[in-house]
Amino acid sequence: MAGGWTDGDVVRVRGRLAELVGGLPGVVAEDSFGHVGLVLGRKRIAWLLVDHHGDGRLTLAVKAPPGELETLMAADPARYFRPAYVKSWVGVELHEVEPDWAEIGALLEQAWRMTAGKRAVAAYDAEHPRAHGP
């Protein structure tokens, strides 16, 4: 255990993330060096980072469009941060602050939309009329 979270916390967070990406076509979870990558094809859309390089944190890094990180950090700097090594991705604190699972789900869907092809997005939208846009 590092940073005050337990292995049980990691299992719970991983399960919640699996629920959130379960409806996103083609996304699979891959264990990698103690972390979990959420992958679409060969492209990562997110990482569950467990004590990344000994930082003592339990966090999520999610692919995001330019400007998203700055907007979220300005609105809630305790919850969102700039993750190391991945430009323009959003870092989300999963232990020190109660996760906003609805927002995390929206971030994951956005990352999927950025990565999936136009046909996959169109098919998803046809099956989930309210799942996108305002």
Image (spheres, grey):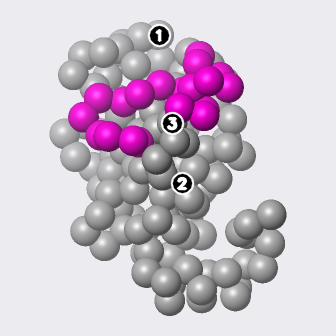
Q: Dot 1: few (<14), some (14–19), or many (≥20) neighbours within 10 Å?
A: few
Taking depth in this image into account, of 94 and 131 the one nearest to the observer is 131
Q: What residue appears at the point 40 percent right and 19 percent down from the top-left corner? A: 57
Q: Is residue 133 above or below residue 34?
A: below
**Callout 1, which amino acid?**
Gly
In the rendered image, the residue lying farthest to the front is: 67
Image height of 61 relative to 25, above or below: above
Q: What secondary structure do most residues of the magenta stretch adopt? A: loop
Tell us which disc is closer to us: 2 or 3. Answer: 3
Q: Which quadrant holds residue 2?
A: top left
Amino acid type for the residue under numbered disc 3:
Leu
Q: How much space separates mark 1 and mark 3, taking CA atoms?
A: 26 Å
**What are the residue bounds of the magenta stretch?**
70-89
Disc on the earlier residue, 2 or 3: 3
- Which residue is rendered at x = 52% and y = 68% of the image? 113
Front-most of 10 and 122?
122
- The C terminus lies in quadrant: bottom right
Question: Which residue is denoted by mark 2 in the rendering?
Answer: 108
